[in-house]
Amino acid sequence: MGIYALLIGANLVAWTWALMCFHGHPVLLGTALLAYSFGLRHAVDADHIAAIASLNDHFGVLGFVIIGVFVVSWTVSILIYRRNRYDEIEASAEPPLESFP
């Protein structure tokens, strides 16, 4: 039940955002609906489902490794960012003079 609630919630958020952004632009809203329907059609295509199942069978463990490497590298980069206190450096809107020829 949890995955269905997540999918329904994500769809509600996406369509709420689309309605807010494309309010007053029915052509853009229709284009969003067309893209959504093509995406649904593609998602339930038999070849697509078979390809995903095959990848899951062969590379299931590899996915966990990739996610683990991503999480570790992201954590290390946050720790280095905070250690070097990059968030305390003031950003200037003007480029440095050395960058001009």
Image (tube, rainbow, N blue to C red):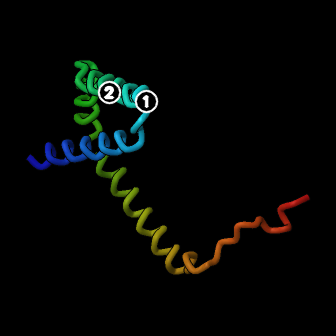
Q: Position of residue 16 (x, y in %)?
A: 30, 44
- Residue receiving disc 2: 39
Q: Quadrant of residue 43?
A: top left
Nearest to N terminus: mark 1 or mark 2: 1
Name the kind of residue labelled 1 in the image.
Answer: Leu
Where the C terminus falls, by quadrant?
Answer: bottom right
Q: Which is closer to the viewer, label 1 or label 2?
A: 1
Determine the residue located farthest toward the right in the rendered image. Answer: 101
Is 28 on the left or on the right of 42, as rendered? right
Inspect the image, locate mark 2, and give the three-letter code of the amino acid beneath it.
Gly
Front-most of 21 and 73?
A: 21
Callout count: 2
Q: CA distance from mark 1 to mark 2?
A: 16 Å
x and y percent of residue 48 in the render? Answer: 28, 23
Position of 16 compared to 99: left or right? left
Outermost residue toward the left? 1
Determine which quarter of the picture holds residue 89: bottom right
Q: Is residue 63 left or right of residue 99?
A: left
Query: Which residue of the protein is positioned furthest toward the front in this rendering?
Result: 24
Res 28 label? 1
